Image: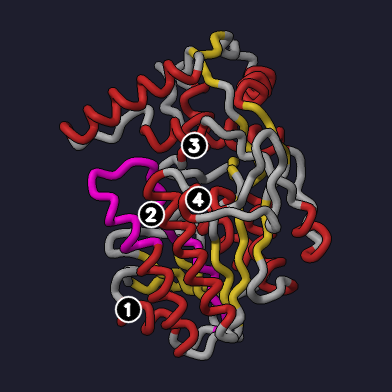
Amino acid sequence: MKPTLVTGASGFVGWHVARLLVERGHNVRALVRPGSKIPELAVETVTGDLRDAASLARAASGCGQVFHVAADYRLWSKNPDDLYHSNVDGTRNMLTAARDAGLERFVYTSTVGCIGVPPNGIGDETQPVARAEMAGAYKRSKFMAEEVALEFARSGFPVVIVNPTAPMGDHDFKPTPTGQIVQDFLNGAMPAYIDTGLNVVNVRDVALGHLLACERGVPGERYILGAENMTLGQILRELADITGRPAPKIQLPYVVAWTAGVVTTALAHLTGIPPRAPMEAVRMAKKKMWVSHAKATAELGWTPGPARQALVDAVRWYESRRPERP
């Protein structure tokens, strides 16, 4: 069996994709940057960088398929061009390397941020959306990268796109911005919240969705990998029920969050320290990112579990990593 290449296996979603592939008997080759490691998984590692086309050609050589999960996932950067180089140029480099190596399948991990959501409605893969609607460098860069993937699909290369929503669960190493919600709750660092909405999904279900997209997805098509639409208040109350800790009761007006975003982001540009409330995150929070995963269910046979289990898994994992109190 030819190796399966996974980019981003040292990150949250990529680690789970690699884990599931290993569990199913695949020979996994993971692209890692110098100094990065893939904890707990028996995989072959190759050193490279999405901005180094030659390293990607070496990584893709001899592989049968690739899951391109790696991305620069930051809602603030002092140098936004870094996100475009990694997410847009890097995706084009990876697609080119895979096509030139004759790979049989390419699964590209996009984001729900690239899905159109009508005002006060539910988005899906058919909803029109334009680059101008993308708030901030991260969403714009991912939207542009998705356009590159679709360009390759139109040329005949077998690219399938998945759009995960807000994955939560175990092994969220950094953590991601969604995982930070759980960490902040556990640390008592969320005294208030704003009226926003996410679609929460278990990261283990997202990994399975990747494999199903590889096996059954139609090239050139996009598949939303989500589970339950929830307000942030509902998520926090669910976390309170799971942990027995109180949920914050104060809901801040959006203008307060906007002001905090302006101030903390301005300070970040001066200090170089990432802000607690990036302006990009505040802009994204103004819109409830509620979507339907009906297409993935109908075409891939994907049936995600309840969001509560994702939150339970995340709580257990973060709690297991907290230092023991004397």
Q: Is residue 15 above or below residue 200?
A: below
Q: Are marks 1 and 3 in contact (CB under 8 Å)?
A: no
Residue at image mark 3? 284
Residue designated by label 4: 12
- Residue that mark 1 sits on: 53
Q: Which amino acid type is marked by label 3? A: Met
Q: Earlier in the sequence, mark 1 or mark 2?
A: 1
Please give the name of the residue rendered at 29% of the width and 31% of the height, measured from the top-left corner: 265
- Which amino acid does the dot numbered 4 rest on? Phe
Front position among marks 4 and 2: 2
Up/down of 124 relative to 238, above or below: below
Name the mark nearer the viewer: 2 or 3. Answer: 3
Viewer can see residue 319: no
Magenta stretch encompasses residue 228: no
Q: Nearer the viewer, residue 192 or 81?
A: 81
Marks 1 and 4, how far apart at CA = 24 Å
Callout in the foreground (1, 4): 1
Measuring from the top left, give residue 71's x and y in whole percent.
42, 58
Three-letter residue code for mark 2: Asp
Residue marked by disc 2: 72
Cα–Cα gap, marks 1 and 2: 17 Å
Distance of mark 2 from mark 3, alpha carbons?
Answer: 17 Å
Sequence order check, earlier mark of 4 and 2? 4
Amino acid type, residue under disc 1 in the picture: Ala
The secondary element bearing badge 4 is classed as helix
- Residue 174: x and y in percent read 41, 43
How crowded pointer 3 is (Cα within 10 Å; few <14, some 14-19, many 20+) is rated as some
Give the magenta-colored segment's residue range: 64-87
- First in sequence: mark 2 vs mark 3: 2
